[in-house]
Image (cartoon, rainbow, N blue to C red):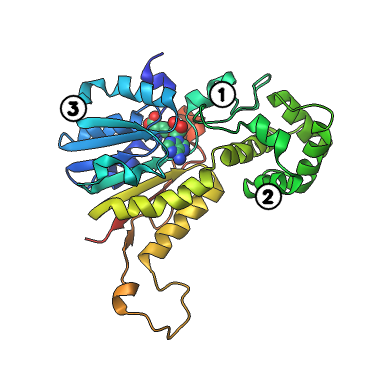
Amino acid sequence: MHASDYHAPVLVEEVMSHLLAGDGLYLDGTAGGGGHAEALLERCPGCRLLAVDRDPEALETARARLDGHAGRVAFARMSFRDAPRHPRLRGERLAGALLDLGVSSHQLDRRRRGFTFRRGAALDMRMDQEAPGSAAELLARAPRGELHRTLRAGDAPRPGALAARIVQRRAGGALRTSDDLVAVLESVLGRRATHAEKARLFQALRMRVNDEIAALEEGLPGIRDALRPGGTLVVISYHSVEDGVVKRAFRDWSDPSRGLPPRLPVRAAELAPLGRVLTRKPVTPPAAEVEANPRARPARLRAWRRAA
Ligand SMILES: C[S@@+](CC[C@H](N)C(=O)[O-])C[C@H]1O[C@@H](n2cnc3c(N)ncnc32)[C@H](O)[C@@H]1O
């Protein structure tokens, strides 16, 4: 498979125009098939890159794609949550960092990875297949309350009823495939589930299996602190819950006084903005991009620059 068939990078021009902040070291915390990484290295001959992904298949693809830039790229299989502690960042701060969240087209298209509701897919959903806890295991073991919270946090339809039905259904045998899960959803909805309803259910489970919201909430401040003055952070999210986390973090860093009670005894330096939001509204893909690549549709790009 050619690397460009692995995943079509979204909003490439918009990412580059916000991310590039001079020569130096950049972090791609979600390297995937290496599409954004390649664009960065091609456009900036003085840039070097730390390319990170949890998925070894993604890193292999990115490595092959970026072969021509070998001297300027280092690869690391890890969560971007831990990237600020990578040895490369000990002596040097980042000129910029990119997080292009979620899953790649390749991950979605591989039935054995179990990310989609296509018929007969195993309920796996782990980005790192050596990590513990597949979706099937979660569905088999999680108490009803945890299932409810997981489904509600990920915006799945009828989360309470779904959690109860999963618990009822598993008493008669484990849920193993996408068909089993879709059948449970349809038994709750009382009709054929729409594409969007199935997608919301599968996405909610995937986000829990990979602990995606916690990785984002913990990763963002660490990456912010690893930026050099004037360094940029660009995040593309595909789910309203993720986008909300990014929006709040960027807003709070840009106005630390936000939400504090009046006349609280804090020093002026503690209220100084750490940087500023570069995107007043999230940047969305142009119609032509969505037409060429419908998976780009939900993308929301936000960018932030550390104070100089
Ligand atoms: C949308 S794709 C990125 C595509 C990439 N920008 C490109 O141009 O090909 C998302 C990638 O992020 C990875 N990923 C998601 N969460 C991660 C995390 N917390 N740490 C590291 N990688 C993560 C997934 O394994 C997947 O390969």
> Of label 2 and label 3, which has the lower sequence position?
3
Would residue 289 be visible to someone looking at this image?
no
282, 89: nearer the viewer: 89
Would residue 12 be visible to someone looking at this image?
yes
Image-quadrant location for residue 37: top left
Mark 3: which secondary structure?
Answer: helix
Find out whether the residues at labels 1 and 3 contact each other: C-beta distance under 8 Å: no
Instruction: Read off the residue under disc 1.
Output: 113
18, 166: nearer the viewer: 166
Residue at the far top: name it. Answer: 1
Image-quadrant location for residue 31: top left
Image-quadrant location for residue 77: top left
Mark 1: which secondary structure?
Answer: helix
Residue at (48% x, 23% y) in the render: 106
> Of label 2 and label 1, which has the lower sequence position?
1
Instruction: Tell me the tag on residue 149.
Output: 2
Amino acid type indicated by mark 2: Arg
The reply to whether the residue tagged 1 has its Cβ within 8 angstroms of ligand 1 is: no
Residue 10 is situated, as x and y percent measured from the top left of the image, at 41, 35
Q: Residues within 10 Å of mark 3 (few under 14, many from 20)?
A: few
230, 87: nearer the viewer: 87
Residue at (37% x, 26% y) in the render: 59
The reply to whether the residue tagged 3 has its Cβ within 8 angstroms of ligand 1 is: no
Residue 305 is situated, as x and y percent measured from the top left of the image, at 30, 55
Amino acid type indicated by mark 1: Arg
Residue 1 is situated, as x and y percent measured from the top left of the image, at 41, 13
For the residues labelled 1 and 3, the Cα–Cα distance comes to 32 Å
191, 70: nearer the viewer: 70
Mark 2: which secondary structure?
Answer: helix
Amino acid type indicated by mark 3: Gly
> Of label 1 and label 3, which has the lower sequence position?
3
